[in-house]
Image (spheres, rainbow, N blue to C red):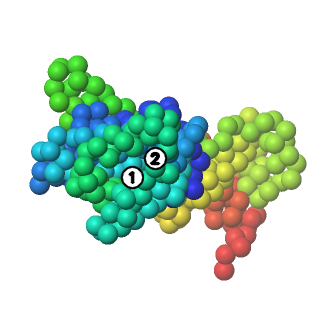
Amino acid sequence: MKLKTSVPGQYLGYGLQPTRLCFHLMNEASGSKISLEHLDDVAIHHKSGTVILEQSKSALSGNPASNKSADLWKALSNWAELPRSLFDSVDLFRYYVTPFKSGDLVRELNEAKDVGKAATLLKRFKTKSFKGAPGIGAEPLIAKFLAAGDPVCLKVIERFELLSENDPLETIRGKLAALLPEENLDRFCEAAIGMAKAEVEGLIRKGKVPLIETGGFRKKLRAFIRKYDFSNLLAPTTSAPADHQISDILARQPTFVQQLSAIDPSSRLMAIAVSDFLRATADKVTWADAGSILETSLDELDESLVRHHRLTADELSDTHAELEAALRGRQLYRRCTELQLPLEGRTLPAYFVSGEYNCLADDRRLGWHPNYLSLFPSRSP
């Protein structure tokens, strides 16, 4: 049995069986095939010829894992009535329940992996006290199961597996988490489930067996991820700040604002600079905390920005030495903040480089006025 702690319910937007189909397509070895509503709700067909049959039950109301659950006994009796050729090829009869539910009987069934434990359970099933009154509750389904005979019933019990978890999407997210940023997982989960569902429905419409090969599905999914790579764009984490937030920064006069003031900027340029500074600062923290970027990548970006600043300042000192200091500083600022660079090969929001330049100015690693080194001495040794 498997217990998950995440919240239930999101899978309802996709359908439980397509969600389980998608998970198995991502989880099973290449060469295996997964079917939907063919041999069972979902079935795993191994290259060796053996299969795993899975009954998938939603437990948002009621408990399909309770001792006398009609769902449970219907699954057991259906498995016991399988054609002999199919029955003998089954490695596991899996009973999947979500959100997490359990019961004394399913726990005992799950643990009855040898003939002795299975026989003890089967003996109890035959008692009148267990079956209950004829025709009442689960009794007809229990009788149907027992009618298959002891050898079959024992094998169903021995091969029974209970799997219960709170959120069936979590296992799919786990498969994608190593490849994609956290903020993109749900979008790709939805896409992967949709692809699995569409493919199997296409087979059904064509009158073909609804059977999908795992390796082929994963190849298509990888191609989809490459084509629609949401992770290639580092998305903004905040909207533009309000006017009062900008006014508050200007009133506090942090170093980057003082550096800009030294080159007599327009009020509009100053407001844009403060906005870019605030948004870039928020983005860096959020992206790093979410694992969307490596912090060392920001250091590499900063080195590139500082290098560009030095080269541009040197060029302007050669070509525009006659300009007054403030005007030369504004030209330097514009030339630097118009630069667009990627971060880890991903496109940055338009404001980010400008914001990061102001972060560097705030740390006195660079400046805009030709004499910024004397006006704003660096804190670095």
Which disc, if any, is residue 200? none
* Number of marks in the rendered image: 2
Residue at image position (25%, 45%) is: 148
Q: Nearer the viewer, residue 188 or 29?
A: 29
Question: Badge 1 is on which residue?
Answer: 126
Quadrant into which the C terminus falls: bottom right
- Residue furthest to the right in view is 251
Residue 312 x %, y %: 52, 53
Classify residue 311 as left or right of residue 200: right
Q: Residue at x 24, y 37 (%)?
A: 39
Q: Amino acid at mark 1?
A: Lys
Q: Amino acid at mark 2?
A: Lys
The vertical placement of 381 against 174, above or below, is below
Compare residues 336 and 223 and report the one nearer the observer. Answer: 223
Using the image, determine if residue 317 lies above or below residue 59: below
Residue 56 horizontal side relative to residue 209, left or right:
right
Residue 102 seen in this snapshot = yes
Closer to us: 188 or 301: 188
